[in-house]
Amino acid sequence: VFIDFLHTTFAAADAERSFGIFIHGVAAVFVGIDVNAARKSKRGNGGYGKNSFLHGISLFVCTERPSPHRPPNTSENERLLNMTALARVISPRNSQRHKREGNRMKLYNSVGPNPHVVRMFMAERGIDLPKEDIDLMAGENRQAPYTTKNPAGQLPALELDDGSILTEITAICEYLDETQPGDRLMGDTPEARAQNRRWTRWVDLKIVEPLTTAFRAAEGLPMFQDRMRCLPEAADGLKACAQDGLVFLDEQMADGREFVAGKAFGLADILLFCFLAFGSQVGQPLNPDLKHIGNWYARVSQRPSVSA
């Protein structure tokens, strides 16, 4: 962008105007003005004081001055857009580093498979955020001050820079994947993201949901019966539903795929692994007859992120 800026600015022999655009670019970098907004109004101040030196430069630069020396293929809009691009790239006001000054983003964390999903996802992506532990076993997530931020009492929760709260583990992971630097786990194309979401959704509905609902209705009933509606009479059927989902997935993975959604490791793998690991601790172990899922589980368990 910088090279394009220099080329389009100084290629013209109109030295006076070239110097004006250069000064305007410096102003854009250091005070964050909107070049296009200044151009739209020849009498506007472009975001700085009306009587200031920079305002005078803005009027000079943004006033139409046809030049016989301007390259025929370089329009006024192109020249100004190059300046805007330069300002966005190197302006301290617009840089990622500046935006993260005074960063408030943090993860409300606890024991359990749901927070494990987000921690493992963050570890895979190389994301490090401050964490505040909430005592789930003692019910701290169901009382103030936590419920003032998250009335539903879910864990984990992500507090964003502006203080707003994001819940639901898949939403948190996708938000971090889209906003943080690095290679995306959800995929780089619409097709890859769609397949990842497809299988993440399927694992959630067909395996995770019955597995966890069955746990709350059986082994976890003493802890959850006073916190939410539990269905102890449905526990055995729900456990069977989770196993049915695993049998179906094992059949699908017989096609030789390395991961749940195909060739690439993604959120669907993290979700399934964390809840199968949890199930093995609460009376719902993985059926050893499911060879394809068993081999997949063994491979994923070797990833360093599982200990996050």
Image (cartoon, helix red, strand yellow):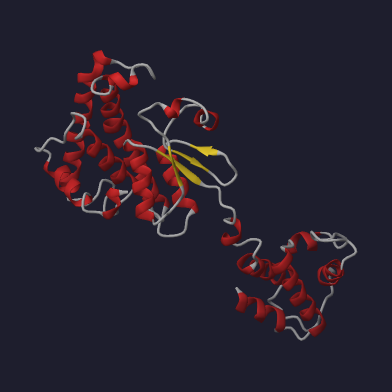
Looking at the picture, how far across and down is residue 259, in whole percent?
24, 49
Say which quarter of the image contains residue 33: bottom right
**Looking at the image, which residue sits at the far right?**
51
Left-right relation of 55 to 7: right
Q: Quadrant for the N terminus, please.
A: bottom right
The residue lying at 82 percent from left, 82 percent from top is: 16
Q: Nearer the viewer, residue 193 or 55?
A: 55
Q: Residue drawn at (60%, 62%), measured in percent from left and top?
A: 95
Front position in the image: 297 or 37? 297
- As displayed, is residue 95 above or below residue 141? below
Res 49 quadrant in image? bottom right
Side (left or right) of 7 relative to 300:
right
Image coords of residue 77 (percent x, y): 72, 67
From the viewer's perspective, is 19 left or right of 11?
right
Horizontal placement of 257 versus 31: left or right? left
Q: In the displayed structure, would residue 155 be above or below residue 44?
A: above
How many marks the image carries: the answer is 0
Can see residue 186? no
Residue toward you, 110 or 187 = 110
The image shows residue 57 at horizontal and vertical percentages of 84, 71
The residue at the far left in this view is 289
| Residue 84 visible within the image | yes
* Residue 110 placement (x, y as % from top left): 38, 37
